């Protein structure tokens, strides 16, 4: 009996120690924490968000739950999160659109700088230049030569006007001086369908979206953005290796909180996410999706968002792109 009692006390002490280690500052969180995702369940963003939310729950013993709020180019979710109480009990799974929408949309009901504070940079999804298998080119240089010989004859599709993959195409044409025609679709899936069918010649797509089609041989990848090749596409060169070193167009994912959220809460969340991103199992899951783990401090994430905002503002202004 005494031995059992000692065992129970030991277990209780261990649990208490773990809980004390996992719990956030001042009892945070005091209730389940919704992480608002601006897209429908099952997509790339949702999948990345669920990996992080699941591990946060497992590590801390708190409950981090996904709330999908799609629509209006992510503005519905962004506006909803911007109005949340600044206590860390509501988080936004932020996207590259936070770097695009303030320039693209003229009457937003939120201000990225004033209404949000960075928490953690989770991952980047490189952009892949993907072409129809029948297009007679083997490299980015071949594609550029073909495009220059036939101005505006080649079409590239995107998941919608003003999306990061549309702007990637505009950035590519600006850098290389080629002229191509943009075809806008209502989502990346129909754009990929027409690419496979030969109705369009190429798309600039995020790696998680294009990966299965590339591996399945339905389309051909010519180059991937980022400083190094993707683990899942080792034979596909970077744009720098392909001769376009100034091209970079990552989609990115990160956690943000309403402005005014206490600093200790932000730092605790950042440290927990940082730990998760260094776990081999988490890294493997993200890399298999085509997403590259990021990480870093809250300050570094804020600087990254600002740099991305400057990049896309220049592209939007130069090409006079609007949300209309």
Image (spheres, helix red, strand yellow):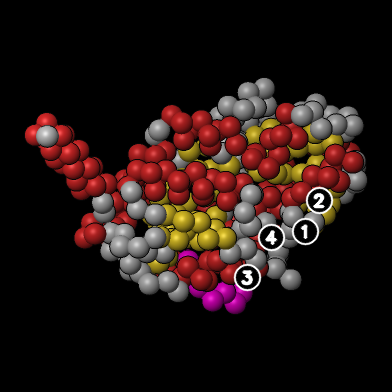
Q: Which mark is residue 122?
A: none
Question: Would residue 244 be visible to someone looking at this image?
Answer: no
What count of labels does the image hold?
4
Contact check, label 2 and label 1, Cβ < 8 Å: yes
Q: Which residue is mark 2?
A: 190
Alpha carbon separation for disc pair 2 and 4: 17 Å
Q: Which residue is mark 4?
A: 162
Contact check, label 2 and label 3, Cβ < 8 Å: no
The residue sitting at 51% across, 48% down in the picture is 50
Q: Which mark is residue 105?
A: 3
Alpha carbon separation for disc pair 4 and 3: 10 Å
Nearest to N terminus: mark 2 or mark 3: 3
Secondary structure of the residue carrying numbered label 1: loop
Residue nearest the observer in this picture, 147 or 190: 190
Alpha carbon separation for disc pair 1 and 4: 12 Å
Residue 155 at x, y = what percent? 85, 47
Q: Which residue is mark 1?
A: 186
Nearest to N terminus: mark 2 or mark 4: 4
């Amino acid at each position: 009996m005494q031995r059992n009692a000692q065992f129970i006390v030991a277990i209780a002490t261990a649990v208490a120690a773990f809980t004390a280690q996992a719990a956030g500052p001042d009892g945070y969180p005091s209730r389940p924490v919704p992480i608002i995702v601006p897209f429908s369940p099952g997509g790339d963003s949702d999948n990345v968000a669920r990996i992080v939310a699941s591990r946060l729950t497992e590590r801390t013993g708190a409950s981090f739950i996904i709330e999908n709020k799609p629509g209006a180019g992510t503005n519905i979710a962004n506006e909803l999160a911007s109005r949340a109480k600044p206590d860390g009990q509501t988080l936004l799974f932020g996207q590259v659109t936070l770097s695009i929408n303030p320039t693209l949309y003229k009457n937003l009901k939120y201000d990225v700088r004033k209404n949000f504070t960075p928490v953690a940079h989770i991952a980047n999804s490189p952009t892949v230049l993907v072409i129809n298998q029948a297009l007679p080119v083997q490299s980015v240089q071949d594609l550029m030569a073909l495009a220059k010989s036939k101005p505006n004859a080649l079409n590239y599709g995107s998941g919608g006007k003003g999306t990061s993959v549309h702007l990637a195409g505009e950035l590519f044409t600006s850098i290389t001086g080629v002229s191509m025609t943009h075809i806008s679709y209502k989502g990346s899936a129909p754009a990929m369908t027409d690419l496979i069918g030969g109705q369009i010649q190429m798309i600039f797509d995020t790696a998680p979206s294009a990966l299965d089609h590339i591996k399945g041989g339905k389309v051909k990848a010519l180059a991937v953005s980022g400083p190094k090749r993707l683990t899942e596409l080792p034979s596909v060169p970077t744009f720098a290796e392909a001769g376009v070193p100034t091209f970079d167009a990552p989609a990115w994912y990160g956690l943000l909180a309403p402005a005014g959220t206490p600093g200790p809460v932000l730092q605790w969340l950042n440290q927990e996410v940082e730990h998760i991103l260094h776990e081999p199992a988490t890294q493997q899951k993200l890399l298999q999706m085509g997403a590259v783990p990021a990480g870093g401090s809250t300050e570094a994430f804020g600087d990254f968002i600002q740099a991305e905002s400057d990049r896309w503002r220049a592209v939007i202004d130069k090409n006079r792109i609007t949300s209309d």
